[in-house]
Amino acid sequence: MTTPTSYTEATLAAYMHATLGDVASALGWAAGTASYGEAVNETALAYGVDDITTITGRENIARLRALARAESWRQVMSYTAGDFDFTADGASYDRSQVHAQAKAALQLAEADAMRYGAYGYDVVVQNVRDVHDPYAYIPDDDRVLAP
């Protein structure tokens, strides 16, 4: 299977649906922009574009996919925020587990998206060499006071 070189709203929604897997099925979401329309919009806003079809290039597609994963899990969290645990007819129902799992998945997806400079987080690594060694011997004739 080849890596996608571009996305439309429909294909990005399908990717988001595949990302959620069984969670999407449990929530009753179908593959298509009807269930994922707002998550697609949030992905475009997070990326900083008005039209995702303009995004091309391997690194840009990777960033788009990372943002789409995060926004799909954010939508699950929003959708399940009101789920609560209850007991009925002698059985216990822990509906809040989906929300907790979505929160953990969102944190992982956001950390992955940060690799691509998403969410305003960039890391720059460079070599630093300290030339001011306090233990280095400097002869008196070489000591110079700054003016």
Image (tube, helix red, strand yellow):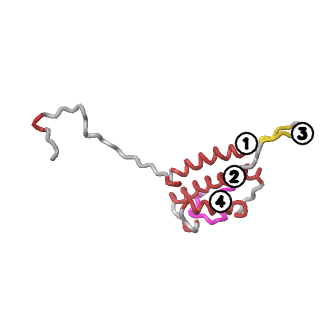
Q: How crowded is mark 3: few (under 14 residues within 10 Å), some or many (20 or more)?
A: few
**Distance CA(mark 1)–CA(mark 3):** 20 Å
Q: Which of marks 4 and 1 is nearer the N terminus?
A: 4
**Front-most of residues 35 and 6:** 35
Q: Where is residue 142 in the image (x, y as percent from the top left)?
A: 12, 38
Evaluate if marks 1 and 3 touch, with contact meaning CB atoms under 8 Å apart. no
Q: What residue is at 71 percent from the left and 51 percent from the top?
A: 21
Reading the image, the residue beneath label 3 is 89
Q: Residue 97 carries which label?
A: 1
Q: Position of residue 41 (x, y in %)?
A: 63, 63
- Magenta stretch bounds: 2-17
Q: Which amino acid does label 2 sit on?
A: Val
Which type of secondary structure does the marked residue at label 3 adopt?
Answer: loop
Q: Residue 13 carries which label?
A: none
Which type of secondary structure does the marked residue at label 4 adopt?
Answer: helix
Q: Which of marks 4 and 3 is nearer the N terminus?
A: 4
Which type of secondary structure does the marked residue at label 1 adopt?
Answer: helix
Is 56 one of the magenta-colored residues? no
Q: Which mark is residue 76?
A: 2
Q: So how many labels did they put on this image?
A: 4
